[in-house]
Image: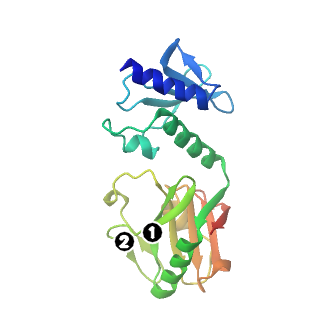
């Protein structure tokens, strides 16, 4: 087991030379982040799932990340990713949280516009999956109910999925701005939220954060 730990440590310091040993143990490292925070990883039991936290400079746990990182959620001891791959995914996730711009695939967005037109005058309502900082998939929640003026689904029917960070729904009325109901219910649990208004073209799309503040989005080919 120690040879495996040593191999992982060598990979870490090769890719992250600023890594700091914790208590002089090669199985525990800290990666400096901004604002005096650190990514702390304890992989002494590798290939079992490591313990990962974001900590402050006085070693207090600021945020546990095991439930929000896909690699940790689907960790398999028989086929584990490298610790470097895990660090890369966590740092990408952190950088995307700092980004004020949402990226979405053009093909997906065109498909959503077509779906809105097809369902008009009924609303569409769904969730958006984001991988490596890019929105790549539309998910129709089980049991979702929509009408000409509203949409509803029960989050508990979906189960936990850390990649479903966004929502999307249409406004057949033509108003691309969120209602109070949108902000207080649909938006509340999601990082970003798209509204596509009639006539369902690129000029009638807006994106908002979970407080209802408009944010930028970029369409990727």
Q: Give SS at disc 1.
A: strand
Q: Residue 88: image x %, image y %?
A: 55, 40
Q: Is residue 150 above or below residue 192?
A: below
Q: Residue 177: image x %, image y %?
A: 63, 72
Q: Residue 187: image x %, image y %?
A: 53, 61
Assign the N terminus to one quadrant of the image: top left
Say whether residue 206 is left or right of residue 119. Answer: right
Nearer the camera: disc 2 or disc 1: 1
| Residue 140's disc number | none
Q: State if disc 1 and disc 2 touch (CB < 8 Å).
A: yes
Q: Residue at x 43, y 22 (%)?
A: 5
Q: Dot 2 corresponds to which residue?
A: 144
Q: Give SS at disc 2.
A: loop
Q: Is residue 25 above or below residue 115?
A: above
Say whether residue 49 is left or right of residue 189. Answer: left
Can residue 33 be seen here? The reply is: yes
Number of numbered discs visible in the structure rendering? 2
Q: Residue 115: image x %, image y %?
A: 48, 81
Where is residue 38, by image quadrant?
Answer: top right
Where is residue 173, by image quadrant?
Answer: bottom right
Q: Residue at x 53, y 72 (%)?
A: 108
Q: Is residue 77 above or below residue 68?
A: above
Q: CA distance from mark 2 to mark 1?
A: 8 Å
Q: Nearer the viewer, residue 6 or 208?
A: 6
Q: How is the image coloured?
A: rainbow
Q: Dot 1 corresponds to which residue?
A: 126
Where is residue 152, by image quadrant?
Answer: bottom left
Q: Nearer the viewer, residue 23 or 209?
A: 23
């Amino acid at each position: 087991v120690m040879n495996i730990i040593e191999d992982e440590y060598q990979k870490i310091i090769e890719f992250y030379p600023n890594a700091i040993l914790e208590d002089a143990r090669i199985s525990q490292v800290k990666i400096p982040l901004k604002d005096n925070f650190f990514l702390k990883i304890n992989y002494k039991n590798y290939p079992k799932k490591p313990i990962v936290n974001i900590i402050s400079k006085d070693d207090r746990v600021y945020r546990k990340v095991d439930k929000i990182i896909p690699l940790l959620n689907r960790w398999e001891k028989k086929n584990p990713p490298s610790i470097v791959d895990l660090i890369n995914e966590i740092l990408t996730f952190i950088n995307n949280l700092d980004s004020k711009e949402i990226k979405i695939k053009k093909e997906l967005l065109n498909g959503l516009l077509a779906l809105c037109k097809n369902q008009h005058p009924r609303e569409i309502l769904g969730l958006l999956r984001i991988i490596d900082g890019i929105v790549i998939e539309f998910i129709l929640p089980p049991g979702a109910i929509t009408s000409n003026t509203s949409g509803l689904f029960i989050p508990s029917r979906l189960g936990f999925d850390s990649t479903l960070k966004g929502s999307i729904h249409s406004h057949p009325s033509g108003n691309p701005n969120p209602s109070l109901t949108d902000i207080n219910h649909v938006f509340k649990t999601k990082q970003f939220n798209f509204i596509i208004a009639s006539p369902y073209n690129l000029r009638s799309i807006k994106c908002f954060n979970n407080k209802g503040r408009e944010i930028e989005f970029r369409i990727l080919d």
